[in-house]
Amino acid sequence: MTLIRLDNISRFYGANEVLVDLSCQVEEGERIGLIGPNGCGKTTLARLISGELEPDRGAIHRKKGLTVGYLAQEAGVEPGVTVLEATLTAFQDLLALHEDLVQIERRMAAGDHAEATLSRYGRLRDLYEKEGGYAFEREAKTALFGLGFREEDLDRPAEVLSGGQKSRLSLARLLVRQPELLVLDEPTNHLDLQATEWLEGFLSACAGAVILISHDRYFLDRTVTQIAEIERRRLVLYPGGYTAYAAEKQRRVEQQRKLYEAQQELIERTEEFIRRNIAGQKTRQAQSRRKMLEKMERIHRPAAGGRGARFNLSGLDRGGDHVLSAEGVTKSYDARTLFRDVTFTLRRGDRMGIVGPNGVGKTTLLKVLAGRLPKDRGEVLLGHRVSVGYYDQERAGLNPDSTVLEEIRSVKPLEEDEALRAFLGRFLFSGDEVHQVAGTLSGGEQSRVALAKLIFARPNLLLLDEPTNHLDIRSRTALEDALSDFDGTILTVSHDRYFLNRIARSILCLDGDSWGVYYGDYDAYVQARNRQSNDEFRMTNSEWTNKKIDIRHSTFDVHSIQKPETQAATKAERKALYEQARRADRERERRERRFAQIEEEIMSLEGQVLGLDEEMSRPEVAADWGRLGDLSQRRAQLKAAADRLYEEWEKMEGRTWNAER
């Protein structure tokens, strides 16, 4: 059943068109991820769907009696209520029913045993039980605890909560209502990984339809079955989660690029023919081709990866092999110990992610390692010629009164304006935008300025605190691509699991009084955690204590965890590993040859399709139904053959991805 249908809606802000002639519908039980660059109109569309806004043009049709729950990015709470009471307001009908039952019980206790009173009490009690009256408080607490609240938080006044806590409270209240359609705008903001995983499970089990606005690609993969992308103020739909969307998007862009280039070549040849023959013996042919060009539906040039920022982190000072060593690092605030005896070492090229619940000290640890906070106990030592670049999620290094250009100039005061402008162009600041004052920029724009400053300084050790916060998906992908090519060392705090899977080669997990180091990306860490047998992946505090690290000498004689793949102790094991590597190389070469062959065949088929399109557009062919039918059948055969090749390509890419993983 269709819950809501949007027919050719448009929305303007002043003279600016945000959404133009957009049509879509949401069916019962659908899970849709809404994505697009910052500022493209995602929140506007969410507010239109939820009924908070009306379209300037077009119509929105909702199922009669449809209940919609909308979570805005900035949430407010009612004053004068506790956290639990604010959540229970989602059950207004049950609360009213409960109050009626209480009033009748008081009358009965005072001696009113009339048949009418007893009958009404019985009916209300049955209705209360049927509607879940004896379970709604438990459901409210389950949602609150799942989203990171503790038992002692339930009686706190809601108005004293932080902005992030208010957002989590609003989300809990919305979830327990269980509306037919949930519209959630960045619901994972302010959630740690544990709460995000709980929300994933809740959304997967809920019966209603869900529309999610999110830059969290891992979250989208685990919660939605369809991606809706706002592109050029219109909506484009893709089946599957984010990973399936990314593959299909790339395929469509590549296909459109080839079609665009082939059409441009055809147009160029046709225009050249027209120029040569418009006044000669072949004038009628030239005029016919001119009409054909006028009727031709032009293929748009595909966007070259969108407007995501382009990062460049190559050509850095190499530095020494040993980059950063920490032994027994401990930090407390008042009587609470955030982390104790944290010990690890980073060598050149290492990439470590730091994860853990909110409040365990991830950012504090990063600041201690960067020398921005004092440690209570332990040692931190940087290696030879190590230059540190620190990215603060609060962007504390930005001067709110400086322009974008002045912020970059503060890194290298003698650099020419032209070079500074060219560099800022890679971060989407062009023309007069470089003269914008930092304090007036959005959070995403400020993040881009801070990252630009960091990268312009060219350090060889990056300490990054939530670097993907405030960045849209395209800019996150561009950052990941750059960091993948970065030949220095990276230590990053992040809740972005997709980012950690692409960047991290080891994970440091902080969890209250304990900590552990796991080899591999985020998924490998989760698998090890779930298996509850982490001997191959994790080194406990006591094991580190037994491996004392002498960091007083510049030799950096540090003992690291031996990776499982380096533990082949016998000649037979080494030979087996060698043979396995050779087989993998041969298989990779075979796949690469087939990839090249498929690409040539696809280009040939699509060229033939374009040729048929050109022929079918000629007036004499359009009037010949028999010939037109033959050409249409041939075109369909060629298109089917190309589609089969694309399917083979996708399957091979899937096997390649799985093999590399």
Image (cartoon, grey):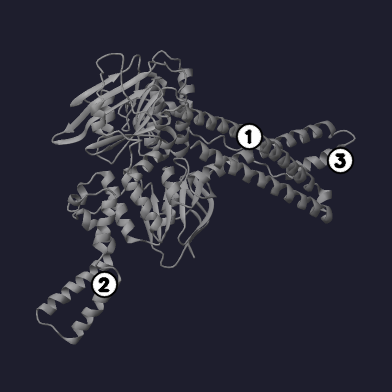
Query: Compared to 80, does 349 lie above or below?
Result: above
Q: Quadrant of residue 270?
A: top right
For the residue labelled by badge 3, is the local secondary structure a helix, a strand or a loop? Answer: helix
Horizontal arrangement in the rendering, residue 510 relative to residue 601 (left or right): left
- First in sequence, mark 2 or 1: give its number: 2
Residue 111 in the image: state x and y as whole percent: 10, 82
For the residue labelled by badge 1, is the local secondary structure a helix, a strand or a loop? Answer: helix
**Amino acid identity at mark 1:** Arg
Neighbourhood count class around disc 3 (C-alpha, 10 Å): few under 14, some 14–19, many 20 upward: some
- First in sequence, mark 2 or 3: give its number: 2
Horizontal arrangement in the rendering, residue 118 relative to residue 315 (left or right): left
Q: Nearer the viewer, mark 3 or mark 1?
A: 1
Asked whether residue 383 is in view, the answer is: yes
Identity of the residue drawn at 47% across and 32% down: 478
For the residue labelled by badge 2, is the local secondary structure a helix, a strand or a loop? Answer: helix
Identity of the residue drawn at 86% across and 37% down: 283
Residue named by callout 2: 128
**Amino acid identity at mark 2:** Tyr
Neighbourhood count class around disc 1 (C-alpha, 10 Å): few under 14, some 14–19, many 20 upward: few
Q: Are marks 2 and 1 in contact (CB under 8 Å)?
A: no
Query: Residue 4: which numbered mark, if any?
Result: none
Residue named by callout 1: 590
Q: Nearer the viewer, mark 2 or mark 1?
A: 1
Query: Residue 284: which numbered mark, if any?
Result: 3
Q: Quadrant of residue 629?
A: bottom right
Q: CA distance from mark 3 to mark 1?
A: 52 Å
